[in-house]
Image (tube, rainbow, N blue to C red):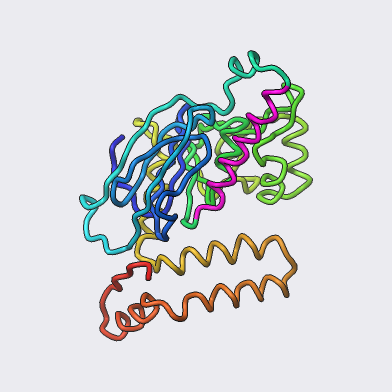
Amino acid sequence: MAVAVAPGALVSLRGCRARLAAACYAPLGPRWRLPGSFTGPQVGWAIWVRGWTPAAGGTTLRRGYSSELKTEDELKVRYLEEENRGADLKERVKMNSSEIGPFVSKIRAVINEIANLPVPTIAAIDGLALGGGLELALACDIRVAASSAKMGLVETKLAIIPGGGGTQRLPRAIGMSLAKELIFSARVLDGQEAKAVGLISHVLEQNQEGDAAYRKALDLAREFLPQGPVAMRVAKLAINQGMEVDLVTGLAIEEACYAQTIPTKDRLEGLLAFKEKRSPRYKGE
């Protein structure tokens, strides 16, 4: 599965495995941390993590950003493997009541960090995304799935509720009434059903390799790659924050975000490239 990843963080849930590739359009800080999840050293353009285990210890991702990429050979990918279907129920059974709250809080914090990544994120669901797996996908900007994929927030079957943001992000994705129906019933959807309710943006027939959604996610990421890094970051910020407020306030947020692009070198480069009829060479500055 070693393939090049275009910048624009990717999360893929394949089979019972989850993957996250973070390729940064914008700086995440000299040492950006996700609390208690996965670990990845600096690898140039992309940091790829397959597996997501909130109990696995600390995480460090380093930055790397630009869109001056000529060939896929210049993209680098780092892999870490872990099994993942969401929460490990066998591990959960061994926990006492006092341990569960902090454990779920840590999961929620990790998912929130992913939701707030200043890069586009795409969840590619090729297999199971149940409970925490779907909550992880819901934290991404875009979701694509194979028709054979299975996804759902099934926590009420265990007499609990989604604790990684599912009760908040699912209604925002598909509407309150339908989200309540799915959570109350613990219903599991396939790819076609998920597309019909608006949970995912694209559904694909699974291929022999079992990575149809992942390949679609890469295609989308490559569409994002040529765009201005600062513009991508503030566009995501404007959309995310604007969706939480009324229209007048949202337009004010858009204005403030637009203003951040005006003094950038990338904006001038975009105008110059248009004048010279060439592709822009953005550097996230």
Q: Residue at x 30, y 86 (%)?
A: 275
Going 40% across and 59% down the picture, which residue do you hit? 25
Is residue 126 visible in the rendered structure shown here? no
Q: Quadrant of the N terminus?
A: top left
**Residue 146's x, y, as percent?**
48, 37
In this rendering, position of residue 186 left or right of residue 134? right
- Kindly indicate the quadrant of the structure image that contains residue 196: top right
Q: Is residue 107 magenta?
A: yes
Foreground: 118 or 56? 56
Q: Is residue 201 above or below residue 104?
A: below
Would you say residue 284 is visible in this rendering?
Answer: yes
Q: How many marks?
A: 0
Rendering quarter of residue 195: top right
Q: Quadrant of the C terminus?
A: bottom left
The location of residue 203, given as percent across then percent down, is 50, 44
- Identified at 31% across, 52% down, the residue is 45
In-front residue for pair 235/42: 42
Question: Residue 153 at x, y = what percent?
Answer: 66, 33
User: In the current view of this chain or complex, which residue is farthest to the front?
Assistant: 30
Residue displayed at 75% across by 68% down:
246
By secondary structure, the bulk of the magenta-drawn segment is best described as helix
User: Magenta residues?
Assistant: 98-117
